[in-house]
């Protein structure tokens, strides 16, 4: 599931010192904004946010001031050494976009599973999947096609490698015959 529920707290302090105090308290400063939404400065729980951001195409359901906002991460600022989350920008999205993000994430998980079960390279299957989605196919429909396309490409690569290996073997055999010294003629 790519939807994660988080509860936000209002933030009234700003600046470097305030941000450090917030982070020491186990929270991350964040901003929520969108087309029809006023800018909201909030704090989010660090651990839960870090776990949520590990998921592909995550949708964050932020509970704030009695309302739930469907958001997606826009910008995540991290400490360059420790990689701790320092600040997050979240954009309010529609229910339709949230459903599409969820479908895409579910499809990616299915691609991983199907590729491993088929014994195929996951990266090659993901590439075929993303190409299908880019052509306009729905993510959940593209999973089966991506696995079939990747299997076909793997067979083509294997056939090409076998033909190349056979050609190299033939060339090596021909080279061995030419390089072999002729047997001396028998003295009569």
Image: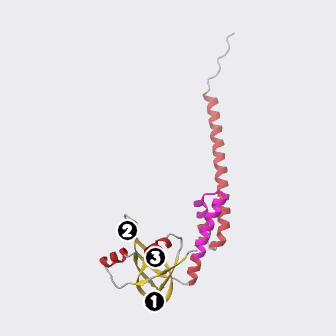
Which residue sits at x=68%, y=67%? Answer: 144
Q: Residue furthest right?
A: 188
97 relative to 65 in the view: left or right: right
Say which residue appears at 42% left-offset and 76% top-offset. Answer: 88
How far apart are the two marked residues, 3 and 2, measured between alpha carbons? 17 Å
The earlier-in-sequence mark between 3 and 2 is: 3
Q: Which residue carries the number 1 mark?
A: 65
Q: Which residues are magenta?
A: 102-128
Which of pointers 1 and 2 indicates the residue nearer the eye? 1
- Is 80 placed above or below 3 here? above
Q: Reading the chain from its start, which is encountered first: label 1 or label 2?
A: 1
Mark 3, residue position = 74
Q: Nearer the viewer, mark 3 or mark 2?
A: 2
Give the secondary structure at mark 1.
loop
SS state under label 3? strand
Element marked by disc 2: loop
Q: Is residue 90 left or right of residue 170?
A: left
> At which x and y percent is residue 23?
37, 75
Instruction: Kindly identify the residue that appears in the image at 50 percent across and 73 percent down.
Output: 52
Q: Nearer the viewer, residue 57 or 45?
A: 45
């Amino acid at each position: 599931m790519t939807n994660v529920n988080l509860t936000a707290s209002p933030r009234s302090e700003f600046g470097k010192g305030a941000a450090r105090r917030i982070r020491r308290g186990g929270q991350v400063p964040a901003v929520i904004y969108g087309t029809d939404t006023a800018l909201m400065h909030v704090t989010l729980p660090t651990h839960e946010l870090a776990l949520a951001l590990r998921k592909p195409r995550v949708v964050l359901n932020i509970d704030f001031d009695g309302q739930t906002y469907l958001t997606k991460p826009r910008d995540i600022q991290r400490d360059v050494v420790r990689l701790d989350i320092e600040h997050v920008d979240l954009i309010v999205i529609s229910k339709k976009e949230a459903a599409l993000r969820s479908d895409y994430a579910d499809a990616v998980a299915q691609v991983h599973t199907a590729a491993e079960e088929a014994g195929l390279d996951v990266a090659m299957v993901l590439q075929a999947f993303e190409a299908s989605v880019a052509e306009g196919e729905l993510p959940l429909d593209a999973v089966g096609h991506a696995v079939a396309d990747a299997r076909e490409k793997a067979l083509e690569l294997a056939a090409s490698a076998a033909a190349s290996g056979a050609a190299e073997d033939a060339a090596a055999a021909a080279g061995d015959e030419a390089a072999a010294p002729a047997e001396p003629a028998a003295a009569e």
